[in-house]
Amino acid sequence: MDEKLWPITMTRKISDIHSGGFSMDDEKRFGFKKGELFELPKELFELITFHKKNLGENLNKYKEKCILNNPDYNEIQKSVFIHKSAQIDGHVEFNTKKGIIVIEKDVHIEPFSYLVGPLRIDEGATIHPYAYITNSYIGKVSKIGGEVDNTTFESYSNKGHHGYIGDAYIGSWVNIGAGSSASNLKNTYNSVSLKGVMTGETFIGPIIADHVKIAINSSIYTGKVIGISSHIYGTVTEDVPAFTNYISKNNKVTLPLHLALKIAETMESRRNIEMTEEEKGMLTDIYNKTKKEREACEAKEGKLLF
């Protein structure tokens, strides 16, 4: 595991990370050479910047190699490629002035959505009514609504309601409650620092690791990193360690391991996936490894109180 890419590489292999709309595993599966679609990040924030830089060109490569002569895809309007199994409801608007749009197998786009390329929506995802999504990758079996810009969502994550996420990387098994938003721009318009590293970028949103749960109407400050299996309430002004209930800067409580495992198992079962003993062991190991981080941020043990 590359520690510079923690917490993301604590729960997934580098080959399973998406940036620029594709992963190393995708490259291999679609017959591309290593490095043709996925640019390996050396810093955590590059998951975001490489995505923004590469998505448009990657989709054009994918179109030429995998879509144009594939009878399973239809070009329903110029530069909008839809798998024949996808369901597109009425009053969906596509804008391809800046890049192509690819809608994969079994995707459902619900009414009154506005989709702006470059954009790839992966297999089995659902886009809820009135969504506005641009320059993003939406992972498999995710459910997305509201406004999403310049963002990667890994598989099985949900942002089903209104709220803004931009210039961000979101892991798997994340749930973002209604009305929750994250900043991607400082009031000073200065360069954003992420995990102590100056990015040189004006627009950087959050990095949100696997199994995070974000309560309704929560707010996350610019360039914050949210650790694995953390639960977010209210306004987040600092990075959040793994397995932490974050209510405020001065009110943080450790999420017990047994409860984190139960929640993860429940969410996965809702998608007809059985949580493996290997995954439970991995989360247990991460819980132990991140204990000092919780102690450093003064996360208390005991009952969660608001």
Image: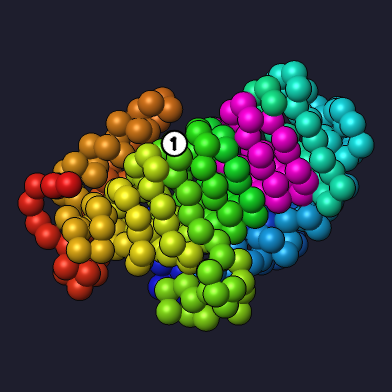
The answer to whether residue 300 of the structure is visible from this angle is: yes
Q: Position of residue 141 (x, y in %)?
A: 54, 33
Residue at the spot 65% in from the left edge and 23% down from the top edge: 110
Residue at the spot 48% in from the left edge and 80% down from the top edge: 197
98 vs 223: above or below: above
Foreground residue, 29 or 19? 19
Q: Is residue 88 left or right of residue 305?
A: right
The residue beneath circle 1 is 178
Foreground residue, 180 or 230? 180
Residue at the spot 25% in from the left edge and 63% down from the top edge: 249
Q: Is residue 209 left or right of residue 292?
A: right
Q: Is residue 294 left or right of residue 152?
A: left
Q: Position of residue 151 (x, y in %)?
A: 60, 53
Residue density around tag 1, few if under 14, some if 14–19, many if 20 or more, within 10 Å: some
33 vs 103: above or below: below
Q: Position of residue 72 (x, y in %)?
A: 80, 27
Looking at the picture, which amino acid does disc 1 mark? Ala
Foreground residue, 268 or 71? 268
Foreground residue, 181 or 266? 181
Check if residue 225 falls in the magenta segment.
Answer: no
118 vs 160: above or below: below
Q: Is residue 223 left or right of residue 145?
A: left
The quarter in which the N terminus is drawn is bottom left
The answer to whether residue 13 of the structure is visible from this angle is: no
Quadrant hosting residue 71: top right
Magenta segment boundaries in residue numbering: 113-142
Look at the numbered disc 1 and give the secondary structure of its residue: loop
Looking at this view, name the residue that lies furthest to the front. Answer: 187
Check if residue 134 falls in the magenta segment.
Answer: yes
Residue at the spot 12% in from the left edge and 60% down from the top edge: 300
